[in-house]
Image (cartoon, helix red, strand yellow):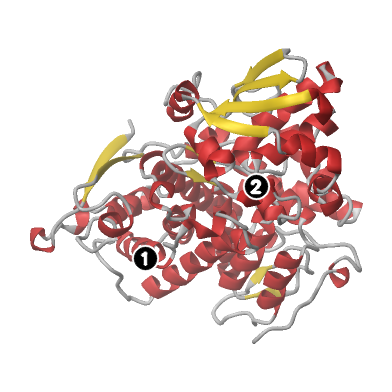
Amino acid sequence: MTQLHHVRVHRSDENLAREGQLAWKIAQVATDPVAVEPEVVDMIINRVIDNAAVAAASLTRAPVSAARQQALDHAVSANGSGATIFGCAIERRTSPEWAAWANGVAVRELDYHDTFLAAEYSHPGDNIPPIVAVAQHVGADGAALVRGLATGYEIQIDLVRAISLHKHKIDHVAHLGPSAAAGIGTLLDLDADTIYQAVAQALHTTTATRQSRKGEISTWKAHAPAFAGKMAVEAVDRAMRGETSPSPIYEGEDGVIAWLLDGKDASYDVPLPAPGEAKRGILDSYTKEHSAEYQAQAWIDLARKLHEARPELADAAMIESIVLHTSHHTHYVIGSGANDPQKYDPTASRETLDHSIPYIFAVALQDGGWHHVDSYTPERAQRPDTVALWQKITTAEDAEWTRRYHSEDPNEKAFGGRVVITLTDGTVIEDEIAVADAHPLGARPFARADYVRKFRLLAEPVLEAAEIERFLALAERLPELTADEVRELTIVAKPGVLESAPAPRGLF
């Protein structure tokens, strides 16, 4: 049975023993040799495919190209074979921390991969780039890689279940540094003491403010999780060399909880697998059918449904107002409750638009769907009839949708809401949706065939047909891969694709 670990702030004179610290308990989970269940293995394969899909679609985007160039400017570090970089030839390697950086940016750039939402929110697939990079560098096989990924997902999801970061304007990647460090620890079969030190260092170096997801959202949004993955790799390296880290990192009187989160009187109950209990956290996460903030997924599906049933709603002249009654989180993060004028700005960045539910709902209602490129172009955002409709859309917090958002009952869990559309003639149209169509409880839950279809759709413009098949064949055999095959677990772009992307020069 899952164990709840009570975590609170301790004064220095209380001398909290290492065995009582959350970082140590995370390390204990990471060192538990419990087998990875077949259902979990299957989902890990799905997410490796999903990550490659969204990375393929982002290969020529400027932030991804900049990160890739940084990685390419660093040689393979000593004592290993290096790691591959998405898009580049398999033989073109870099140091594992820089591969984690470049591949992490590629995966996150389009905001199009898996998600888990609870007390905090997360993209647990962000664990994959750093763990794969280390596996390639050290020559780990597929079975070890699977074990490491199971740990990375488990730790991040367990932290997200219990500890809110956004409440205190701390970016959610503060849960990613520890989870990736723990996952790398499992991959390498490190001892608990080493993983404990790495987890503490990774957390210490990845706490940052949430301004990266506020106002005019910058290109750092995709780099933030990649930075956490890079720091996790470096934290493990440092811990393996026998160096220690701030302790107790969570519970100390000058630690993360006391000064960055709920304060000196705070406490949390963090669920972690008991000794011998399988790591099944990944099964509670879900991927995206649409390239937008996860809480927009269900709303896109509802707008698609309304477009088909009532196509006249695409005409802004017919609409008096549209109110999306939804959860606290959706209202304040991607809705009008954020009080960000940029969410209604037709010249806003792509990163800002994918965090604007008024914009997303307007476009999906008019187009009857969503496209990872076309729905974000300046021409699309600045279309006069879209702007007119967009300005009529607001959100409102609804207590029941907030309760369902935080419910632990999977049958109640909801990330959508109720739409109230008032027409200029006084007619009122209402509809609602609880979860996205692709959610495990949705109308069309994603299965292996859907992940493969998503990969083919996004990869076909930039990968040769043979390369698509090569990658899928490897990914679907993940737990059986040899070390040499793990080193080939990447995607290689068609000739000329990377050359068409910007190649900015920097310091390195």
Place of residue 435 in the rendered image (x, y in percent of width and height, measured from the top left):
61, 25
129 or 364: nearer the viewer: 364
The answer to which quarter of the image holds residue 174 is bottom left
- Horizontally, residue 420 falls left or right of residue 263, namely right
Please tell me whether residue 433 is drawn above or below residue 507 in the rendered image: above
* Residue at the (47%, 65%) spot, across then down: 232
Q: Amino acid at mark 1?
A: His
Residue at the bottom extreme, as displayed: 507
Comes first in the chain, label 2 or label 1: 1
204 or 365: nearer the viewer: 365
Please tell me whether residue 109 is drawn above or below residue 360 in the rendered image: below
Tag 1 residue: 204
Helix, strand or loop under label 2 = helix
Place of residue 66 in the rendered image (x, y in percent of width and height, measured from the top left):
71, 72
102 or 294: nearer the viewer: 294
The answer to which quarter of the image holds residue 55 is bottom right
Place of residue 397 in the rendered image (x, y in percent of width and height, measured from the top left):
50, 30
Residue at the left extreme, as displayed: 13
Tag 2 residue: 343
